[in-house]
Amino acid sequence: MFVSDNNQNQQLGSSKQRNKRWTDVDSYFSDLLIAHDPMLEEALQNNTAAGLPPQDVAPNQGKLLHLLARIQGARTILEIGTLGGYSTIWLARALPADGRLITLESDPKHAEIARANIARAGLSDAVEVRVGQALDLLQELDVESKCFDMIFIDADKPNNPKYFEWALKLSRIGSMIIGDNVVRDGAVADADSTDPSVLGVRRFFELIASEPRVSATAIQTVGCKGYDGFAIALVTDDVYNESTNEGACFVELSER
Protein backbone atom coordinates (compact mmCIF):
# COMPACT_ATOMS: atom_id res chain seq x y z
CA MET A 1 0.00 0.00 0.00
CA PHE A 2 1.22 3.50 -0.86
CA VAL A 3 2.41 5.51 2.14
CA SER A 4 2.84 9.26 1.76
CA ASP A 5 5.97 11.07 2.88
CA ASN A 6 3.93 12.75 5.63
CA ASN A 7 2.69 9.40 6.89
CA GLN A 8 6.20 8.00 6.77
CA ASN A 9 7.50 10.95 8.80
CA GLN A 10 4.68 10.53 11.30
CA GLN A 11 5.45 6.83 11.67
CA LEU A 12 9.16 7.57 12.08
CA GLY A 13 8.41 10.18 14.72
CA SER A 14 6.04 7.84 16.49
CA SER A 15 8.67 5.09 16.46
CA LYS A 16 11.28 7.40 17.98
CA GLN A 17 8.84 8.51 20.68
CA ARG A 18 7.95 4.90 21.43
CA ASN A 19 11.60 3.83 21.69
CA LYS A 20 12.35 6.81 23.94
CA ARG A 21 9.47 5.83 26.21
CA TRP A 22 10.78 2.25 26.38
CA THR A 23 14.24 3.55 27.29
CA ASP A 24 12.79 5.93 29.88
CA VAL A 25 10.92 3.08 31.57
CA ASP A 26 14.06 0.90 31.58
CA SER A 27 15.98 3.78 33.17
CA TYR A 28 13.24 4.29 35.76
CA PHE A 29 13.35 0.64 36.82
CA SER A 30 17.15 0.45 36.77
CA ASP A 31 17.58 3.65 38.77
CA LEU A 32 15.18 2.41 41.44
CA LEU A 33 16.00 -1.29 41.61
CA ILE A 34 19.66 -1.65 40.62
CA ALA A 35 22.34 -0.20 42.85
CA HIS A 36 25.15 1.89 41.39
CA ASP A 37 27.87 -0.61 40.44
CA PRO A 38 31.23 0.78 39.27
CA MET A 39 32.48 -2.64 38.09
CA LEU A 40 29.52 -3.26 35.81
CA GLU A 41 29.50 0.31 34.52
CA GLU A 42 33.24 0.13 33.84
CA ALA A 43 32.75 -3.13 31.95
CA LEU A 44 30.28 -1.44 29.61
CA GLN A 45 32.62 1.52 29.17
CA ASN A 46 35.53 -0.80 28.38
CA ASN A 47 33.44 -2.68 25.83
CA THR A 48 32.46 0.56 24.10
CA ALA A 49 36.03 1.89 24.14
CA ALA A 50 37.27 -1.35 22.58
CA GLY A 51 34.76 -1.08 19.76
CA LEU A 52 32.71 -4.13 20.70
CA PRO A 53 29.21 -4.22 19.19
CA PRO A 54 26.57 -2.75 21.56
CA GLN A 55 24.95 -6.11 22.20
CA ASP A 56 25.30 -6.39 25.98
CA VAL A 57 22.10 -7.09 27.88
CA ALA A 58 20.46 -4.07 29.51
CA PRO A 59 21.13 -3.58 33.26
CA ASN A 60 17.63 -4.72 34.23
CA GLN A 61 18.01 -7.76 31.98
CA GLY A 62 21.34 -8.54 33.61
CA LYS A 63 19.66 -8.30 37.00
CA LEU A 64 16.95 -10.69 35.76
CA LEU A 65 19.60 -13.24 34.77
CA HIS A 66 21.22 -12.82 38.18
CA LEU A 67 17.93 -13.38 39.99
CA LEU A 68 17.02 -16.39 37.85
CA ALA A 69 20.38 -17.98 38.65
CA ARG A 70 19.83 -17.37 42.35
CA ILE A 71 16.26 -18.67 42.24
CA GLN A 72 17.58 -21.71 40.39
CA GLY A 73 20.24 -22.23 43.06
CA ALA A 74 22.72 -22.68 40.23
CA ARG A 75 26.20 -23.87 41.13
CA THR A 76 27.31 -24.42 37.55
CA ILE A 77 26.46 -22.04 34.70
CA LEU A 78 27.30 -22.21 31.00
CA GLU A 79 27.16 -19.08 28.86
CA ILE A 80 27.31 -19.43 25.08
CA GLY A 81 28.45 -16.04 23.80
CA THR A 82 30.62 -13.91 26.10
CA LEU A 83 31.10 -10.65 24.22
CA GLY A 84 32.77 -8.37 26.81
CA GLY A 85 31.66 -10.28 29.87
CA TYR A 86 28.91 -7.97 31.13
CA SER A 87 26.24 -10.65 31.41
CA THR A 88 28.95 -13.03 32.61
CA ILE A 89 29.56 -10.83 35.66
CA TRP A 90 25.85 -10.67 36.45
CA LEU A 91 25.57 -14.45 36.29
CA ALA A 92 28.81 -15.22 38.14
CA ARG A 93 27.80 -13.02 41.04
CA ALA A 94 24.81 -15.30 41.61
CA LEU A 95 27.03 -18.34 42.21
CA PRO A 96 27.79 -19.71 45.67
CA ALA A 97 31.39 -19.67 46.91
CA ASP A 98 32.14 -23.02 45.26
CA GLY A 99 30.24 -22.21 42.05
CA ARG A 100 31.69 -22.23 38.56
CA LEU A 101 30.80 -20.51 35.29
CA ILE A 102 32.20 -21.40 31.87
CA THR A 103 31.64 -18.91 29.07
CA LEU A 104 32.36 -19.54 25.37
CA GLU A 105 33.56 -16.86 22.96
CA SER A 106 34.66 -17.19 19.33
CA ASP A 107 36.45 -13.84 19.04
CA PRO A 108 39.86 -13.68 20.79
CA LYS A 109 39.62 -9.89 21.14
CA HIS A 110 36.24 -10.12 22.84
CA ALA A 111 37.56 -12.85 25.12
CA GLU A 112 40.57 -10.73 26.11
CA ILE A 113 38.35 -7.79 27.04
CA ALA A 114 35.95 -10.08 28.88
CA ARG A 115 38.76 -11.61 30.94
CA ALA A 116 39.94 -8.14 31.93
CA ASN A 117 36.42 -7.07 32.94
CA ILE A 118 35.90 -10.29 34.88
CA ALA A 119 39.23 -9.85 36.67
CA ARG A 120 38.37 -6.27 37.68
CA ALA A 121 35.12 -7.59 39.12
CA GLY A 122 37.10 -10.09 41.22
CA LEU A 123 35.56 -13.13 39.55
CA SER A 124 38.50 -14.76 37.77
CA ASP A 125 38.53 -17.71 40.18
CA ALA A 126 34.87 -18.47 39.44
CA VAL A 127 34.82 -17.85 35.68
CA GLU A 128 36.60 -19.64 32.86
CA VAL A 129 36.57 -18.02 29.41
CA ARG A 130 37.10 -20.55 26.64
CA VAL A 131 37.93 -19.30 23.14
CA GLY A 132 36.92 -21.02 19.93
CA GLN A 133 33.90 -21.99 17.89
CA ALA A 134 31.08 -22.73 20.31
CA LEU A 135 30.06 -26.00 18.65
CA ASP A 136 33.61 -27.33 19.04
CA LEU A 137 33.85 -26.14 22.64
CA LEU A 138 30.48 -27.67 23.49
CA GLN A 139 31.68 -31.03 22.23
CA GLU A 140 34.75 -30.68 24.48
CA LEU A 141 32.50 -29.98 27.47
CA ASP A 142 30.55 -33.13 26.70
CA VAL A 143 33.77 -35.17 26.52
CA GLU A 144 34.73 -33.69 29.89
CA SER A 145 31.34 -34.83 31.28
CA LYS A 146 30.41 -31.29 32.31
CA CYS A 147 26.93 -30.67 33.68
CA PHE A 148 25.24 -27.31 34.16
CA ASP A 149 22.35 -26.10 36.28
CA MET A 150 21.76 -23.08 34.03
CA ILE A 151 22.67 -22.43 30.39
CA PHE A 152 22.41 -19.01 28.76
CA ILE A 153 22.42 -19.01 24.94
CA ASP A 154 23.32 -15.60 23.54
CA ALA A 155 25.40 -16.17 20.42
CA ASP A 156 24.92 -16.38 16.65
CA LYS A 157 21.26 -17.14 16.03
CA PRO A 158 21.61 -19.41 12.96
CA ASN A 159 23.23 -21.97 15.26
CA ASN A 160 20.58 -21.71 17.99
CA PRO A 161 19.09 -25.12 17.13
CA LYS A 162 22.46 -26.82 17.57
CA TYR A 163 23.14 -24.84 20.75
CA PHE A 164 19.84 -26.05 22.18
CA GLU A 165 20.67 -29.66 21.35
CA TRP A 166 24.02 -29.33 23.10
CA ALA A 167 22.48 -27.49 26.03
CA LEU A 168 20.09 -30.38 26.54
CA LYS A 169 22.96 -32.88 26.51
CA LEU A 170 24.79 -30.81 29.14
CA SER A 171 21.72 -30.47 31.37
CA ARG A 172 20.05 -32.53 34.07
CA ILE A 173 16.54 -32.71 35.46
CA GLY A 174 15.85 -29.27 36.88
CA SER A 175 18.35 -27.39 34.67
CA MET A 176 17.25 -24.11 33.11
CA ILE A 177 18.03 -23.16 29.50
CA ILE A 178 17.60 -19.50 28.46
CA GLY A 179 17.73 -18.23 24.88
CA ASP A 180 18.13 -14.48 24.33
CA ASN A 181 17.13 -12.25 21.39
CA VAL A 182 14.50 -14.64 20.09
CA VAL A 183 11.84 -12.18 18.91
CA ARG A 184 14.00 -10.45 16.28
CA ASP A 185 11.89 -7.28 16.25
CA GLY A 186 8.82 -9.45 15.64
CA ALA A 187 10.28 -11.27 12.63
CA VAL A 188 10.16 -14.60 14.49
CA ALA A 189 6.47 -14.78 13.58
CA ASP A 190 7.19 -14.41 9.85
CA ALA A 191 6.98 -17.89 8.34
CA ASP A 192 8.21 -16.52 5.02
CA SER A 193 11.39 -14.97 6.37
CA THR A 194 14.65 -15.94 4.70
CA ASP A 195 16.84 -14.22 7.31
CA PRO A 196 19.30 -16.82 8.68
CA SER A 197 18.92 -15.50 12.24
CA VAL A 198 15.13 -15.68 12.08
CA LEU A 199 15.27 -19.15 10.57
CA GLY A 200 17.63 -20.25 13.32
CA VAL A 201 15.38 -18.93 16.06
CA ARG A 202 12.25 -20.47 14.51
CA ARG A 203 13.96 -23.85 14.28
CA PHE A 204 15.13 -23.40 17.89
CA PHE A 205 11.50 -23.01 18.97
CA GLU A 206 10.38 -25.96 16.84
CA LEU A 207 12.93 -28.17 18.57
CA ILE A 208 11.83 -26.97 22.00
CA ALA A 209 8.16 -27.53 21.12
CA SER A 210 8.83 -31.09 19.99
CA GLU A 211 11.11 -31.97 22.91
CA PRO A 212 9.17 -33.91 25.59
CA ARG A 213 11.93 -33.50 28.17
CA VAL A 214 11.49 -29.74 28.56
CA SER A 215 8.72 -27.34 29.53
CA ALA A 216 9.15 -23.88 28.03
CA THR A 217 7.74 -20.45 27.37
CA ALA A 218 8.84 -17.25 25.62
CA ILE A 219 8.34 -13.59 26.48
CA GLN A 220 8.37 -10.48 24.29
CA THR A 221 10.22 -7.50 25.74
CA VAL A 222 10.63 -3.83 24.92
CA GLY A 223 13.18 -1.44 26.36
CA CYS A 224 16.41 0.39 25.72
CA LYS A 225 17.51 -2.55 23.54
CA GLY A 226 14.41 -2.25 21.37
CA TYR A 227 11.81 -4.95 20.70
CA ASP A 228 12.98 -8.48 21.37
CA GLY A 229 12.50 -11.24 23.93
CA PHE A 230 13.76 -14.43 25.49
CA ALA A 231 12.85 -18.09 25.93
CA ILE A 232 13.11 -20.18 29.10
CA ALA A 233 13.06 -23.98 29.12
CA LEU A 234 13.10 -26.18 32.20
CA VAL A 235 14.46 -29.70 31.84
CA THR A 236 11.74 -31.89 33.35
CA ASP A 237 12.86 -35.38 32.40
CA ASP A 238 16.10 -37.35 32.23
CA VAL A 239 18.27 -36.31 29.29
CA TYR A 240 20.59 -39.30 29.52
CA ASN A 241 20.28 -41.71 26.59
CA GLU A 242 21.32 -45.19 27.72
CA SER A 243 21.14 -46.67 24.21
CA THR A 244 23.66 -44.20 22.79
CA ASN A 245 25.46 -43.34 26.04
CA GLU A 246 24.83 -39.67 25.25
CA GLY A 247 24.25 -37.00 27.83
CA ALA A 248 26.61 -36.51 30.76
CA CYS A 249 24.00 -35.29 33.23
CA PHE A 250 21.52 -37.59 34.85
CA VAL A 251 21.42 -36.39 38.45
CA GLU A 252 18.52 -34.20 39.53
CA LEU A 253 19.35 -30.73 40.83
CA SER A 254 17.67 -31.52 44.14
CA GLU A 255 19.88 -34.59 44.68
CA ARG A 256 23.16 -32.70 44.76
Image (spheres, rainbow, N blue to C red):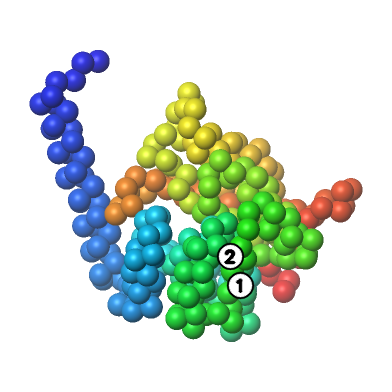
Q: Residues within 10 Å of mark 1 (few under 14, many from 20)?
A: some
Q: Which residue has dot 1 on it? A: 128
Q: Which residue has dot 2 on it? A: 103
| Along the viewing direction, whichever of 120 and 77 lies nearer the viewer | 120
Location of residue 14 by image quarter: top left
Q: Residue 51, which numbered label?
A: none
- At horizontal 49% and vertical 80% (from top left) the residue drawn is 119
Give how far across and how far down residue 8 sits, in percent.
Answer: 17, 28
Whether 238 is drawn above or below 2: the answer is below
Q: Which one is earlier in the sequence, the residue at label 1 or at label 2?
A: 2
Image quadrant for the C terminus? Answer: bottom right
| Along the viewing direction, whichever of 76 and 138 lies nearer the viewer | 138
Looking at the rendered structure, the secondary structure element under dot 1 is strand
Q: What whole-number distance in Å separates the C-alpha atoms at marks 1 and 2? A: 6 Å
Image quadrant for the N terminus? Answer: top left
Dot 2 amino acid type:
Thr
Give how far across and how far down residue 77 sits, in percent.
Answer: 60, 67
- At horizontal 30% and vertical 52% (from top left) the residue drawn is 223
Work out whether residue 110 can be spotted. yes
Location of residue 47 by image quarter: bottom left
Q: Residue furthest right?
A: 243
Dot 1 amino acid type:
Glu
Marks 1 & 2, CB-CB < 8 Å contact:
yes
